[in-house]
Image (cartoon, rainbow, N blue to C red):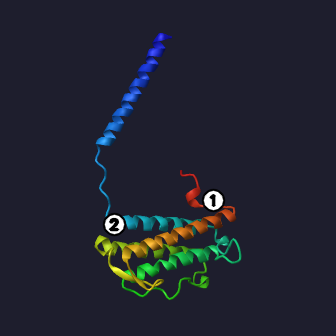
Amino acid sequence: MKKQMVGAVLAVLILAALASAQDAMKKEAPPKPAVGPSQYLLENWNDIGRKLIAMAEDFPEDKYDFRPVPAQRTFAEQLLHAANVNYFFTNPAMGLKPPGEENPKREQYKTKAAVVEFVKKSFADGAAAIKQKGDKGMNDLLVDPFANQQTRVSDMAWGLIEHSGEHYGQLVVYYRVAGLVPPESRPKK
């Protein structure tokens, strides 16, 4: 019994020493350098885009015209709005006029595939604009068409990331009311 106790204590001491050595190695490793402002912006732009694209691809096509209450947009209309509003950043950042309206007509995007493609394109176009501007272009000025005020490229992009995040939250409710689990809430494999 005494031998077993000594063996157990020895095993605990060895594990503690190994854990301590790992902690010391972590503390000795220098932190990774910060990424530039445009790279950080791009990562966040792509992350919310990934979430909305996953929803667009995942939600059943027969529920694309579902709305939780009559006053709300349909699922498809929410996606079309979020994607189209991205062009209020992308177009001015690329020297183009912003879209004429915030909400494209559902009739223009009759199928799930058409909506998915539009959502993908809007985030890809925004990512391309961020990459083209790079760190040096983050402080370039453009006109925020909603406020009719000059704003920095980065500020406009961050505002659209937040806007997309708000619509992501609304679409989570659509999933839940429809009895479905959103892709981000599912267990990871």
Q: Label 1: which residue?
A: 181
| Image spot of residue 188 (x, y percent) | 54, 52
Q: How many marks?
A: 2
Say which residue appears at 53% left-offset and 86% top-offset.
101
Q: Label 2: which residue?
A: 37
In the image, 110 versus 12, the foreground residue is 12
Q: Please tell me whether mark 1 sits on a helix, a strand or a loop.
A: loop
| Image spot of residue 170 (x, y percent) | 60, 68
Q: Relative to residue 104, is residue 38 depicted above or below?
A: above
Which mark's residue is nearer the viewer, 1 or 2?
2
The quarter of the displayed image where residue 75 is located: bottom right
Q: Relative to residue 5, is residue 59 depicted above or below?
A: below
Q: Is residue 25 visible?
A: yes
Type of amino acid at the residue the image marks with label 2:
Pro
| Image spot of residue 62 (x, y percent) | 67, 71
Q: Is residue 20 left or right of residue 172?
A: left
Say which residue appears at 41% left-offset and 82% top-offset.
91
In the image, 9 versus 113, the foreground residue is 9
